Image (spheres, rainbow, N blue to C red):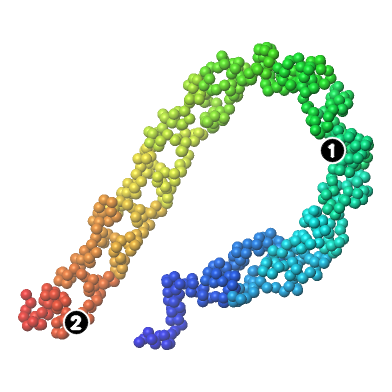
Amino acid sequence: MQWLAWFRYPSWSGWRAAVAVALGLLCGSGAWSQGIESIMSPGSLIQGHAKWEDDCKQCHVKFDRKAQDGLCMACHKEVGADVRAKTGFHGKNKPEACRSCHTDHKGSGARIAAFDHKTFDHALTDFALRGRHQKVECAKCHLVARKFRDAAQDCNTCHRKDDVHKGSLGAKCANCHGESNWKEAKFDHDTARFTLTGKHVDVKCADCHKSSNYQEASRTCVGCHRKDDDQKGHKSQFGDKCETCHGTKQWKSSSFNHDTDTRYVLRGKHRGTGCTDCHSGNLFRVKLSQECFACHKKDDKHKETLGKNCANCHSERNWKESTKFDHSTSSFPLLGKHQKTECKECHKSSLFKEAPKECFACHKKDDKHQATLGQSCADCHGEQDWKTTRGRFDHNRTKFALRNAHAGSAIQCKACHKDLTSFRRTPLDCASCHAKDDKHEGQQGKQCEQCHGDRSWKVAQFDHSRARFVLTGRHVATPCKGCHESLRYRDASRECYACHKKEDPHKLKFGVDCGSCHNSRAWSLWNFEHQQRTSYRLDGGHLKASCEGCHKLPAPAGKLAAPVGIQCVGCHRAEDVHDGQFGARCEQCHVTASWKAFQNRIGTSFPPNQQTLAAALPELGQSSYFNRQHGRSMNGASSP
């Protein structure tokens, strides 16, 4: 009954032990997180947070109160965005912890977002109250069952019924009206689509705006000045765009400049030509062509064989005045020796445009590559000299860019290209040229670039993580030749025992899979979880026993160890002082803590009395030690 007295009069150390046991049970049973949170909770959450009642981590971070604000704003994204942008009520206020205003755990019916409407400073929001807005009741703008932040900030939402323009001027009322008085309006016409300049500044509003729908007023000159054009002007021949020639300062003066205001500059005899000589119809209905041929077709002596761009040879000064043709303006500028070539050498007829522009058309007979490189001769050859190609060809444009050692002056084209017809058929893989340099005898494949570079054939450093055997621990600092005895790298074994055979102190008792216990950090560091990896649990004195104490035979192939029986006598037969008289089940009496300690399964003390022996003999059997020692006294005869 000592344990009962302990609970009645516990010591301080006893209470601490009891609390530790209770916490351990909670952790072990999986009820710790739910149990401790329920115990520590100061009260119920509001209705909006009720779904997180048993999930405190949604609002709290253990041992970090400041992190709570981040969780709040992660849920309340609109408030979080305001705080980060420093806008809205929460963003413009002095930074404070969320819980300083919105404290939860006050019950499901608590209002943690309530505030005093009368003392609220609206200037801390994105909509400061000015003028008559300061006297408007909150409910006029902030509707029931909607968030305060959802209240509209544009004028039109509240004042649509006051809009005498019926929406024709849009929803930006503040462009004309202010908060002090709705009827007082001041409009800056410079902000409109029609800026008032010149004599328009003095014109009354009603002269242009015939109704309250101001948008209906025309913005074109002819909308107001058509009668001036019909009576004194061009009678609509030059269209409705009066502003192209006239200005707002004075109607009669013309500011039209044909050179700058059109895409056709007047030169030579064109400058003295009257407007109506060319523009005989409506200016904006009949579009005049800017091509010479449109007017001078009758003067074309070439019958369109040279096209319609007469200006290539003729000028505005005089149609008959012939100019020297500039071949650089054509699609084939003359360069190098082409400049000295006569026109008839390329232009076989008066149809000049039929002359080919490709090199191959004229120089096919000079092609030493027999068309294996295509017909783009200019990629390598130039107009100055057909035979000079050095510096013309950019090898980087091919599938094999020359870099580093390949780009050296010592490397000639013929080192890779055997003749002038094999440039395109030259293989691109390293092995085709460097097979003779392969010290690996083809074992590493033909992708030499995986290890070698084009700067030098020697490998500065190899990334072993790309191989089948990743280097870790002590292997990282091991020289390559410590494992690779030759340049045939794939011949190196990936098994631990292949390299560490001489270091095996177990003499194959635990097989060749060294990695089952050892690691690459250090050979002396090892770990084998006998409890999890075998069916025989080690306890008591077995925990101190060496591995070789039980596993004495070499492990069979593919096994970590030779089979060892789970019977005690398998290892302790030599220590059996009973010489097998009590059978092979030593655990019936002995325990693993100590061989000398044993458990009394009969439930009596020695020496046994007659009654105890009589009960024990049937269980132990006729050949047992007890029968031989005490059977004589029980049966009155000597034991056999």
Q: Nearer the viewer, mark 2 or mark 1?
A: 1
Res 545 quadrant in image = bottom left
Q: Position of residue 386 (x, y in %)?
A: 60, 17
Please tell me the numbered disc located at residue 532: none
| Badge 1: residue crowd in 10 Å (few <14, some 14–19, many ≥20) | few
Residue 568 lies, with reference to residue 418, above or below; the image says below
The amino acid pointed to by label 2 is Phe
Please tell me the numbered disc located at residue 606: 2
Whether residue 414 is visible, yes or no, is no
Point out the image quarter for the N terminus. bottom left
Q: Residue at x 53, y 17 (%)?
A: 368
Task: Name the residue nearer the viewer: 245 or 417.
Answer: 245
Q: Residue at x 60, y 15 (%)?
A: 362
- Tell me the element at label 2: loop
Task: Name the residue nearer the viewer: 237 or 113.
Answer: 237
Res 247 quadrant in image = top right
Q: In the image, is 94 to the left or to the right of 429?
A: right
Q: Position of residue 531 (x, y in %)?
A: 33, 64
- Tell me the element at label 1: loop
Residue 453 lies, with reference to residue 389, above or below; the image says below
Q: In the image, is 37 to the left or to the right of 89?
A: left
Task: Name the residue nearer the viewer: 92 or 315.
Answer: 315
Q: Residue at x 86, y 43 (%)?
A: 223
Task: Name the residue nearer the viewer: 299 or 578.
Answer: 299
The residue pinned by badge 1 equals 241
Q: Position of residue 209 (x, y in %)?
A: 87, 50
- Mark 2 or mark 1: whose residue is earlier in sequence: 1
The amino acid pointed to by label 1 is Lys
Q: Residue at x 75, y 68 (%)?
A: 140
